[in-house]
Image (cartoon, rainbow, N blue to C red):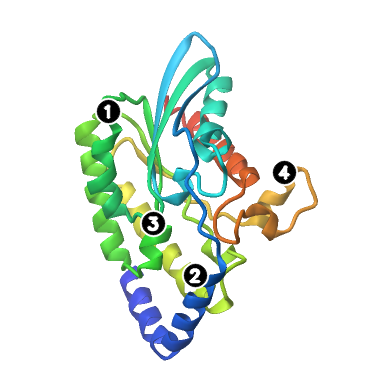
Amino acid sequence: MSRLKYTLGTLAAVPCLPFLLRDGKRIKGSVPVLPEAANPAGINGSGARTINLLAFGESTMAGVGVSDHKKGVTAAVAQVLAQEYDATVTWKVVARSGYTMRAVTHKLLPKAGDFRPDIIVTGIGANDAFKTNSPTEFAAAAREFIKKIQTIYPGVPLVFMNMPPIKEFPAFTRLIRFFIGNLVELHGAALAKTVAKYENVYYIAEKITFKDWIHKADKELTADDFFSDGVHPSGMTYGIWGRETGNYIVENNLL
């Protein structure tokens, strides 16, 4: 079904291609190029138990949109784990803005060094959609990523975070939100099917909608408040997303 939807979507996009290219150039010219966050390693908590958290991924995991990883999603996950398990959580981020699933597998996995995780969290998906990789290609890349993770870190739980909410990116035009947003949802469906075939691998399949998240911030907000530049998350968003991910780990007894 995903393959059929992708094919139909591709055919529908053909007559819109000039407009998609035009919109893409405008967006690229108007969205500022933000740096990755500093200090991609840290410690949260001071409990007796020790938990090592390793994070891989693209710009979201790289902390684009905040100045320091202490304000990023991985530190927010670590804070939940530290509180819920009364633990000292040592975390490390290995991520790069612009990377696809396959690039993360081949270029980033070797860079984790001798860090020995108790749990691994990854956030990948936007760049595969931007490059219009098919759901089949994305699923194949996910299988390769999972197999390499399980070879390098046998027995360690692997959690794929939610797909990025491209349909809600304020900087994108309606046309791009429609085509790329639908594609990333197809990738999410393909990832869910892939993950189901492996033990100790999990995918947080719930779609992110900022309408649902607004009440969690205890403020009167609009969708724009969740972004640093119309594309990448703000510090507030990283905090909510990290807490949601940490709670998923706790509620599913992954540690």
Amino acid type, residue under disc 4 in the picture: Ala
Of pointers 4 and 3, the one earlier in the residue sequence: 3
Residue 62, horizontal then vertical, whole percent:
45, 44
Amino acid type, residue under disc 3 in the picture: Gly
Disc 4 to disc 1, C-alpha distance: 35 Å
Q: Mark 4 falls on what kind of element?
A: helix
Give the residue number, with chain letter if any, for mark 1: 155
Q: Mark 1 falls on what kind of element?
A: loop
**145 horizontally vs 78: left or right:** left
Disc 3 to disc 2, C-alpha distance: 13 Å
10 Å neighbourhood of mark 3: few (<14), some, or many (≥20)? some
Which residue is drawn at the image coordinates 33% and 54% (left, top)?
193
Tell me whether the residue at label 2 lies in contact with that at label 1, contact meaning CB atoms closer than 8 angstroms.
no
Q: Nearer the viewer, mark 3 or mark 2?
A: 2
Amino acid type, residue under disc 2 in the picture: Lys
Disc 3 to disc 1, C-alpha distance: 29 Å
Give the residue number, with chain letter if any, for mark 3: 98
Disc 2 to disc 1, C-alpha distance: 41 Å
Give the residue number, with chain letter if any, for mark 2: 28
Q: Mark 3 falls on what kind of element?
A: loop
